[in-house]
Image (cartoon, rainbow, N blue to C red):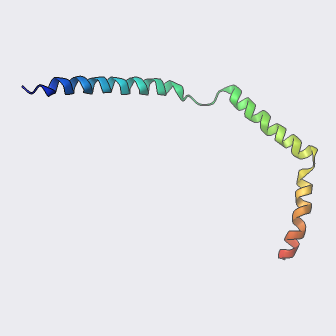
Amino acid sequence: MNLLIPLYVTASLFLQDRVDTYLEKRKDFDRGASFFEYAALIAVIAGMIGVWHKFNLGEKITNKLNPLLDKLK
């Protein structure tokens, strides 16, 4: 009998166990976003919209772009 076969089987089973353990831990790690992460995202977007309206950025950008667009006509 070849003496390397038991070594190969032991190493193979060890590595398979390590991969299975890693994948099992990884499965629970990547669950997706929680309620608080979505709430924070909505709050940030609402804040950006508030700043946009507070400083009237839409009109300022339009006033800057209109002369450039007129040149293209």
User: What residue occupies the far left of the structure in this picture?
Assistant: 1
Residue 54 vs residue 25: left or right?
right
Corner quadrant of residue 6: top left
Q: Residue at x 15, y 27 (%)?
A: 5
User: What residue occupies the far front of the structure in this picture?
Assistant: 3
Q: Residue at x 90, y 69 (%)?
A: 67
Split into 4 quadrants, where in the image is the C terminus? bottom right
Residue 15 vs residue 39: left or right?
left
Q: Position of residue 12 (x, y in %)?
A: 26, 27
- Vertical comparison of 50 with 70: above or below: above
Corner quadrant of residue 48: top right
Q: Residue at x 92, y 56 (%)?
A: 60
Residue 39 vs residue 18: left or right?
right
Residue 17 vs residue 71: left or right?
left
Q: Position of residue 9 (x, y in %)?
A: 21, 25
Total marks shown come to 0
Q: Residue at x 42, y 27 (%)?
A: 23
- Vertical comparison of 54 with 3: above or below: below
Q: Position of residue 64 (x, y in %)?
A: 90, 62
- The answer to which of 5 and 54 lies nearer the viewer is 5
Split into 4 quadrants, where in the image is the N terminus? top left
Q: Position of residue 42 (x, y in %)?
A: 76, 35
User: What residue occupies the far bottom of the structure in this picture?
Assistant: 73
